[in-house]
Amino acid sequence: MAATPARARVDKRAAILTGAFTVFARKGYADACVKEIAAEAGVAKPTVYNHLTDKATLFRGALEAKAQAKLVERIAAIEPLHAPGDDLPAALRAVCRRLLEVHGDPDSCALRRLLYAEVGRFPEVLELVSAYGPHRVVHALADPLGRLTLAGRLTADEPALAAEQLMALLTGPMEVRSRMGTRAVSVDESREVADAAVATFLRAYGR
C-alpha cells in the first residue's frame, strides 16, 4: 500500500533531519551546507527548504530529533530495573552497561560535541538539555530505585539523589576517558566503568 501524503511528508522530514545531523556532526555548523544535507537525505535542495526553512532551523531540528531518540534509548535501558529478578547487582550492571553504550555511541558523542561547540551561537539549544537531557534520565532512573527501596532491596531514601549519583559515577569517568567524546572507549573499558559504578553505588545504598 502506498504511503499517504501526510505519512510521506513525515518520513521525508525525518530523512532530512537524519541527513542534517549526519552532515552537521561531520562538518560542524559553519562548514555544513544545505546542498550537502539534501544529498545525504536523498532529496532535492528545494525539498529541504519546503520542510525546514533555513540552515539554522535545520540545525535546531536535527539536534532535537537526535536528543529525543537518545532519550528513548536511555529510558528503554532503564526498564529492566522495574523487574530486576533475584540478582539485583547483576541487573544494575546490565542496565549501567547499556546506559554507557548509549552514552558512548557515535551519535551521542556527536550530539554533545555539537551542543558544546554551538551553544554560543544557539543558546536556545540548552532547552534540549532540559527537555531530553540528563535530568530526564535521572527522573526515569529514580522511579525503579524508589520502588526497590520500598521493597527493602535498597536504602535509597532519596531516589532522585541516588539516581543522580549513579549517573555521575557512570558519565563522569566516561567523559574523562573519552576526552569529552573525541576518543573511542573500548567495550571492556566501558564495562569496567559501569561495574565500578554499581559496586560503589551498592556500598552506599545496598542492603
Image (cartoon, rainbow, N blue to C red):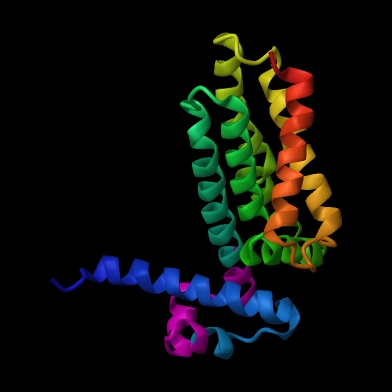
* Quarter of the figure that contains the C terminus: top right
7 relative to 192 in the view: left or right: left
* Quarter of the figure that contains the N terminus: bottom left
Number of residue marks: 0
In the image, residue 22 lies at what x, y percent? 59, 76
Task: Please name the residue shown 63% across and 86% down the image.
Answer: 33
151 relative to 29 in the view: left or right: left
Magenta highlight: main SS = helix
Q: Depth check: 182 or 69 in front?
A: 182
Q: Quadrant of residue 90?
A: top right
Q: Depth check: 145 or 62 in front?
A: 145
In the image, residue 31 lies at what x, y percent? 73, 85
Q: Depth check: 205 or 47 in front?
A: 205
Question: Can residue 17 be seen in the rendering of this structure?
Answer: yes
Task: Please name the residue shown 43% across and 68% down the image.
Answer: 14
Is 40 in the magenta? yes
Query: Outermost residue, left direction?
Result: 1
Is 187 in the magenta? no
Question: Can residue 54 be seen in the rendering of this structure?
Answer: no
Q: From the viewer's perspective, is residue 59 above or below residue 89?
A: below
In the image, residue 180 lies at what x, y percent? 82, 60
Magenta region: which residues? 39-60
In the image, residue 186 lies at what x, y percent? 72, 62
Task: Please name the residue shown 61% across and 44% down the image.
Answer: 131
Q: From the viewer's perspective, is residue 135 above or below residue 9?
A: above
126 relative to 145 in the view: left or right: right
Task: Please name the residue shown 67% across and 84% down the image.
Answer: 32
